[in-house]
Image (cartoon, helix red, strand yellow):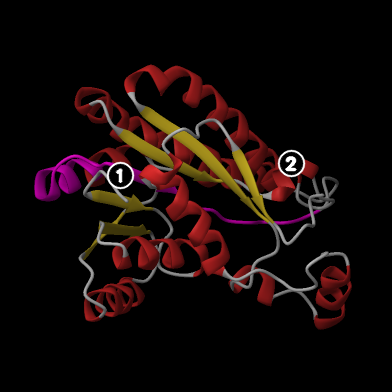
Amino acid sequence: MYKGKLAVVTGAFRGIGRACAEKLAESGVKVVINDVYNREQAERVREEIEESGGICDIMMFDVSSYREVEEGFAKIVEKWGNVDYLVNNAGIVDDNLILRMKPESFKKVVDVNLIGAFNCTKQVVRNMVKQKFGVIVNISSIVGLSGNAGQCNYAASKAGIVGFTKSLAKELASKNIRVNAVAPGFIETGMTKKIPAKDRERLVENIPLNRLGKPEDVANVVAFLLSEEASYITGEVISVSGGLHI
């Protein structure tokens, strides 16, 4: 199912990123998980993956820092060899209405969500071109496709991911490198748990499948796009939203 050997998943200590790492490890892919937060939490994720028979390593770096990303990927390649699969999942929110949003809040979200994807992709593409193989999946959002009041920074960063994905797919297709994006809807993660109960109820009412998604729902699509079963798919943005984006 998987031609390559090594995957890097950013923002992988919880939520969608964690589910992606677990799914890939379960399928026999060696996984390097990244985040910039809690090392103890990272160790727990690694232990769980290894207890299930997978191979997992940890690399801590801030995706918004080009220097840290460059150093992190150099260590990964030195230890494990070339990266075959990259999942650009790391992302943050800092919501507010435009009248109240501070410039630094807009910049911070774009730096992590969009610039972070560029920084990580930049580190793997050269070797992917040399080996004439690679697959990249970028995590966008339905908010990047439809917009959302109070999230102009997040929506802009995720819309940027769509353009980034499509441009790279055209640029790298001749090198046998595929690039796709997944646009999750409202998924049961730490972010959505902060939504007040009444707002969650109204939100679910607008979802045709009448529930929030699970991280595994997204991970299954990511794993498919990385696999050889999707070898003729590139430049696509697949919505995983329970029908919310219809």
Q: Could you tell me which residue is drawn at 40 percent across and 68 percent down? A: 13
Q: What element carries label 2?
A: helix
Taking the magenta stretch, the answer to whether it contains residue 85 is yes
First in sequence: mark 2 vs mark 1:
1
Magenta range: 73-96
- Indicate the position of residue 208 as horizontal and vertical percent values: 83, 64
Judged from this view, the residue extending furthest toward the left is: 79
- Indicate the position of residue 149 as horizontal and vertical percent values: 85, 51
Q: Which of 226 and 45 is in front in this view?
A: 226
Q: Quick one: label 2, few (<14), some, or many (20+) residues within 10 Å? A: some
Q: What residue type is labelled 1?
A: Glu
The dot on residue 152 is none
Q: Visible in this render: residue 102?
A: no
The dot on residue 68 is 1
Q: Could you tell me which residue is drawn at 38 percent across and 17 percent down? A: 174
In the rendered image, which residue does mark 2 sit on?
145
Q: Could you tell me which residue is drawn at 70 percent across and 75 percent down? A: 194
Q: Which amino acid does label 2 sit on?
A: Leu
Q: Is residue 41 above or below residue 60?
A: below
- Indicate the position of residue 161 as horizontal and vertical percent values: 58, 37
Q: Is residue 237 above or below residue 48?
A: above
Q: Visible in this render: residue 157?
A: yes
